[in-house]
Amino acid sequence: MQKIAHSANDLRKSLAEVRGRIERAAARAGRSLSEITLVAVSKTHTAEVLRQAIEAGASDFGENRVQEAESKIKEIGRSHARWHLIGHLQANKARRAVQLFDVLHSLDSLELARRLDRISVEEGRGEFPVMIQVDLAGEATKSGASESELPEIIDAVKGCERLRLIGLMVLPPFFEEAEQARPFFRRLRQLRDAFQMKGAFGERAGELSMGMSHDFEIAIEEGATFVRVGTAIFGARGF
């Protein structure tokens, strides 16, 4: 099992290694490093570990569950990092998500979009950047909108007062061989490009949230703009 990196020095080394891998993958793809945001997946790790990560230079954190993230965000502070909700959002947690997170990666239904927009208005929130999670593999254990549902959800978000669609997200099946994830990343990029041509993201190109510790280099080669990396930064999960 990979050693848990919990000291600021360990985390600094891990972050430097991951950033080096990002830089090399971007260079292979002829891309600018400035296009890619590293989201440190901090689920299961404590607020103290996150403080060490901030000291080591991390600025964006990804959390899977609203309830787990809430205590960390309160302890560390909204302004000390950029907080991303990357896990499935239950409807009954929507209000807390609006209050706590800077970006939602996992919008997956028309109903959730409307609920989030209504709550954002009620809470007096400004723009709420969201990405639609797309289910490209049809895995029963994972959330996400199907390709056929995308146009309706995109149209709904465009009609929202506070939600702002900034891109798409995918969580492909886990493969021992990372190269096998490439078709899923490529397909998401094709979908992003097609909807960008239709103005789905306004004047923006459209973000692509894809790639985790074992496959983020492949994702970058296929156009990822957000990579969600946990184990390669923090080591084994905390409990």
Image (spheres, rainbow, N blue to C red):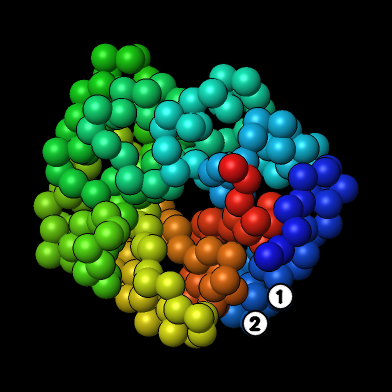
What residue sits right under mark 2 in the picture?
28
What residue is drawn where x is 41% and y is 22%?
99
> Is residue 146 among the parts visible in the rendering?
yes
Q: Quadrant of residue 213?
A: bottom right
What residue is drawn where x is 66% and y is 41%?
59
Give the Cα separation between the discs numbered 1 and 2: 6 Å
Residue 132 x %, y %: 30, 52
Left or right, residue 104 beside residue 236: left
Nearer to the camera, 83 or 152: 83
Disc 1 residue crowd, few under 14, some 14–19, many 20+, Cα 10 Å:
some
Determine the secondary structure under disc 1: helix
Nearer to the camera, 150 or 56: 56
> Is residue 34 among the parts visible in the rendering?
no
What residue is drawn where x is 51% and y is 84%?
177
- Residue type indicated by callout 2: Arg
- The residue lying furthest to the right in this view is 9
Q: Is residue 61 above or below residue 169?
A: above
- Residue type indicated by callout 1: Arg
Q: For the residues labelled 1 and 2, say whether their Cβ atoms are less than 8 Å apart.
A: yes
Left or right, residue 6 beside residue 177: right
Nearer to the camera, 238 or 75: 238
Left or right, residue 7 beside residue 2: right
What residue sits right under mark 1 in the picture?
24
Tell me the quarter of the image containing the N terminus.
bottom right
Left or right, residue 168 beside residue 91: right
Q: Is residue 202 above or below residue 22?
A: above
Determine the secondary structure under disc 2: helix
What residue is drawn where x is 27% and y is 55%?
143
